[in-house]
Image (cartoon, rainbow, N blue to C red):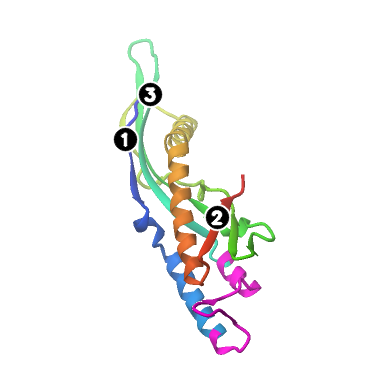
Amino acid sequence: MKKKENKILTFGKATCLTWSLIVLIIAIAIFIFVARLKPDYVETSTDQIISPTPTLIKTMQNIGEWEFLSIADEELIDTMREGIFSNDELVRIYYGTLRIGVNMHKTNPGWLTISNDTLKARLPRIELLDNNFIDEGLTKSFYESGSWSDKDRADLYDRAYRQMKQRCLTPVNIKTAEQSCTTQFTKIFKALGYEKVVITYDK
């Protein structure tokens, strides 16, 4: 079995400024603008705080998958079959991009609450957002001798799939995505006027 390097494509600011986040910020801006036109918005002496109404909560949930870490991986997988006169060998290279983040569709009821002057948000756990992360269009044979069946190639694919998950879904990468997620959500809620924000995650 042979391995090649994996590399982080983008994370932090680069990954977090996805289209989903941009759409959410626009939606929140519109929501704040409309709320300020109404006489019943909450006002303090110095700041305006927009309460987490069902409309706002639904808007955030509708964003769906939020990517906070993207990892590109490349795996070189081989297999060998012994013959009478020579050995057959099949070597293939697999490419994949694993996206890690939160799926807001998986939020539980009451995930967003206010306790005294603190906003608390309990988000779904950080997870792999797409299980079909291997790009089969980029998969290619590096070396091939002898005759190999579709099942043989499927076995190599499965090995590459497992290796990519093992290599990329590490505690360190999960923690990195979680920290980025916490930072971005904290910024969003503070933009709504909440100075104290607590972000936790489902186990």
**Number of callouts:** 3
Q: Disc 2 designates what residue? A: 199
- Residue type highlighted by circle 2: Ile
- Is 60 colored magenta in this rendering? yes
**Secondary element at tag 3:** loop
Report the amino acid beneath label 3. Met
Q: CA distance from mark 3 to mark 1?
A: 14 Å
Q: Residue at x 67, y 57 (%)?
A: 108
The picture places residue 159, in percent across and down from the top left corner, at: 46, 31
User: Which of 177/120 is in front?
Assistant: 120
Would you say 190 lies left or right of 121 here?
left
Write down the residue under mark 1. 5
Discs 3, 1 touching: Cβ within 8 Å: no
Residue at position x 63%, y 57% in the image: 107
CA separation, marks 2 and 3?
42 Å
Disc 3 designates what residue? Answer: 1
Kind of element beneath mark 2: strand
Amino acid beneath label 1? Glu
- The secondary element bearing badge 1 is classed as loop
Nearer to me, 18 or 160? 18
Toward the right, the furthest residue is 109
Label at residue 196: none
Please report the bounds of the magenta region as a residue range.
Answer: 36-61
Q: Earlier in the sequence, mark 2 or mark 3?
A: 3
Which residue is painted at 35% across and 16% down in the image? Answer: 87
